């Protein structure tokens, strides 16, 4: 079990930490914009500096522990998303991975070198630098959510989001158009 440290959801008022609710909204947008994903399941898991003790040696949570139950000091409940890719491989996505991917995008880019980088990543960079109260009211679009979550899962953008109503045409090329 991957146990994240930190408590962004319970950050002091006025802090700039990215909260669970913000990363969950990004993950929800990613799922909605990614029809190739399957077996999607949301869950609540304990995270934090003492969460590993809850999982014990088996790596499993006690059967009687339910989401929302009180947790030991240094722990909190957070979201986790389980999914499969088209090959059937299982993946898990959680708050800590999304925050790490956002940080990577802001400081390193998305791994693609082209002239559209600033246009593609500018929204994420601006969102990241907004004051916390303003940022929490803003919603990143599907392209940003897909970029962030794919970097979190695969360390690259494997399937770029292409809006069929986007400013540059009719969306992605369909190599099987004549068969549809």
Image (tube, rainbow, N blue to C red):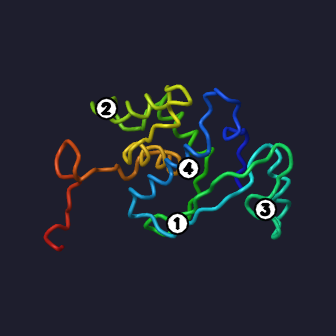
Which badge, 3 or 2, is on the more N-terminal residue?
3
The spot of residue 169 in percent (x, y) is 16, 47
Label 3 secondary element: loop
The spot of residue 157 in percent (x, y) is 41, 47
Check the image and report above or below for 108 versus 7: above
Q: Which residue is mark 4?
A: 24
Q: Which residue is mark 1?
A: 40
> Tag 3: Cα neighbours inside 10 Å, few (<14), some, or many (≥20)?
few
Q: Which residue is mark 2?
A: 119
Which badge, 2 or 1, is on the more N-terminal residue?
1
Q: Which residue is mark 3?
A: 59
> Tag 4: Cα neighbours inside 10 Å, few (<14), some, or many (≥20)?
some
Q: Residue at x 79, y 63 (%)?
A: 61
Left or right for 124, reference 153 = left
Which badge, 4 or 3, is on the more N-terminal residue?
4
Label 2 secondary element: helix
Q: Residue at x 41, y 38 (%)?
A: 111
The spot of residue 141 in percent (x, y) is 38, 44
Q: Residue at x 49, y 26 (%)?
A: 130
Between circles 4 and 3, the one closer to the viewer is: 4
Structural distance between the alpha carbons of marks 1 and 4: 14 Å
Structural distance between the alpha carbons of marks 2 and 4: 24 Å
Structural distance between the alpha carbons of marks 3 and 2: 43 Å
């Amino acid at each position: 079990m991957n146990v994240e440290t930190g408590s962004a959801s319970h950050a002091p008022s006025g802090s700039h930490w990215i909260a669970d609710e913000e990363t969950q909204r990004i993950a929800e947008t990613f799922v909605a914009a990614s029809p190739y994903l399957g077996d999607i399941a949301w869950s609540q898991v304990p995270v934090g500096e003492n969460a590993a003790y809850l999982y014990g040696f088996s790596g499993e949570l006690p059967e009687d522990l339910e989401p929302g139950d009180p947790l030991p000091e240094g722990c909190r409940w957070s979201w986790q998303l389980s999914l499969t890719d088209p090959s059937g491989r299982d993946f898990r996505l959680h708050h800590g991975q999304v925050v790490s991917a956002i940080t990577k995008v802001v400081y390193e880019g998305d791994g693609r070198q082209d002239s559209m980088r600033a246009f593609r990543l500018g929204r994420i960079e601006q969102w990241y630098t907004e004051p916390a109260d303003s940022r929490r009211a803003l919603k990143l679009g599907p392209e940003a959510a897909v970029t962030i979550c794919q970097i979190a899962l695969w360390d690259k953008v494997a399937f770029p989001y292409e809006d069929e109503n986007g400013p540059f045409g009719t969306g992605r090329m369909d190599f099987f158009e004549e068969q549809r």
